[in-house]
Amino acid sequence: MADELGTPARPSARSYDAPTTPIPVYRPPIEVDQAPAPVPPPPSGGNRGRVLWSVFAALVTVAAVVFAFSAFSADEPVREVTVLPAADSASTPTAPAPGRSPLSLPAPPAGKVLATYAGTGTPTAGLVDDRRSGIVYAAFAAPWEQVKPDPFQFRQRAGQAIIASAPIPGANPGTPKTAAQWRALTAKAARWTVTRYQPGEATFQWTASQRTRHGVGWVLGYRVAWESGGKRRTAEAVVALVKTGGKPAMLFASVPDSRKELRRDLNVLLATVRPR
């Protein structure tokens, strides 16, 4: 997530109202069949004219094919990810799977409790009252600070660690009725965060799959790992969807290994998030 302009959060008992800038609605581009450009009739008379016409027709056909491929390949950048089995603990995976494929996350486990991370975590500084999204959750003191939320409704940041909330991106998917439907929708939201806010090439593991503690909804945790400067780096992330009066609300948080002391804050977030 970008845009790091903001002010430090101060410890207090007050709530923070989330900005009301609407989140951009993501809609896949409409696919329209593009018919090849019409080929003009061959000129009358002469072998030279027929040869020139044949070359021109071939160029028109190639141009039409290239246009069709370019039009339908611009939906989303190709991402690669190595999918690992669901993690049994908060430990870093020891060996990535050898094969890579375009990003397609596996179905999350039906049930898996997020590990309790070590440490005391960051002192809270009241609550974030995200009115537009329809949820409330913990606000944290320094080193977290409130920053410009775009494209979310509210955002806190500490270095590369991030906490953000918004109505679920895209068109309203409706309200899931079963645990399986909540889990599947949350997996789509998690994929949205991976493709936009995690490194381009990484290993991926589910680390949690559970109901929200308050209200109706679902929580998924995942871990990504990648190479940077010859070193292995990791990030722990959680995505929670919560039932509201409108679109489901999404709470997303990611903490890299460079800020391991903040990972306990993920547990606090999931313990405090609830509908307004």
Image: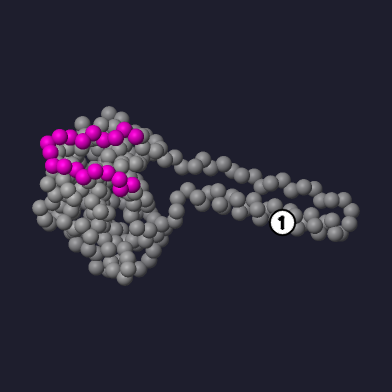
Indicate whether 250 appears above or below 107: above
Give the percent coordinates (x, y) of residue 270. 18, 44
Q: Residue at x 68, y 53 (%)?
A: 61
Whether 127 is drawn above or below 85: the answer is above
Q: In this view of the protein, can residue 180 be seen by the observer? A: no
Which percent across, then down, holds residue 36?
66, 47
Question: Does 79 sit left or right of 230 as displayed?
Answer: right
When the figure is inspected, residue 200 is found, relative to residue 127, above or below; the finding is below
How packed is label 1: few (under 14 Cα within 10 Å), some, or many (20 or more)?
few
Q: Amino acid at mark 1?
A: Ala
Which residue is outermost to the top?
A: 245
Whether residue 274 sits left or right of residue 165 in the image: it is: left
Q: How far across and how far down the image is residue 28, in percent?
A: 46, 42
Judged left or right of residue 116, residue 46 is right
Picture quarter containing residue 180? top left
> Mark 1 falls on what kind of element?
helix
Instruction: Give the camera-side residue of 214 and 196.
Output: 196
Residue shown at the point (19%, 62%) measured from the top left? 91
Visible residue check, residue 188: yes
Residue at 13 percent across and 51 percent down: it is 121
* Magenta segment includes 210: no
Residue closest to the eye, 96 or 195: 195
Magenta part, dominant SS: loop
Q: Position of residue 79 (x, y in %)?
A: 41, 57
Query: Residue at horizontal 31%, vertical 41%?
Result: 149
Give 263 or 143, whichever is nearer the viewer: 143
Q: Quadrant location of the C terminus?
A: top left
Q: Circle 1 sits on which residue?
A: 58
Residue 89 quadrant:
bottom left
Residue 149 higher or lower than 255, as above or below: above
Q: Which segment did they paint magenta? A: 3-21
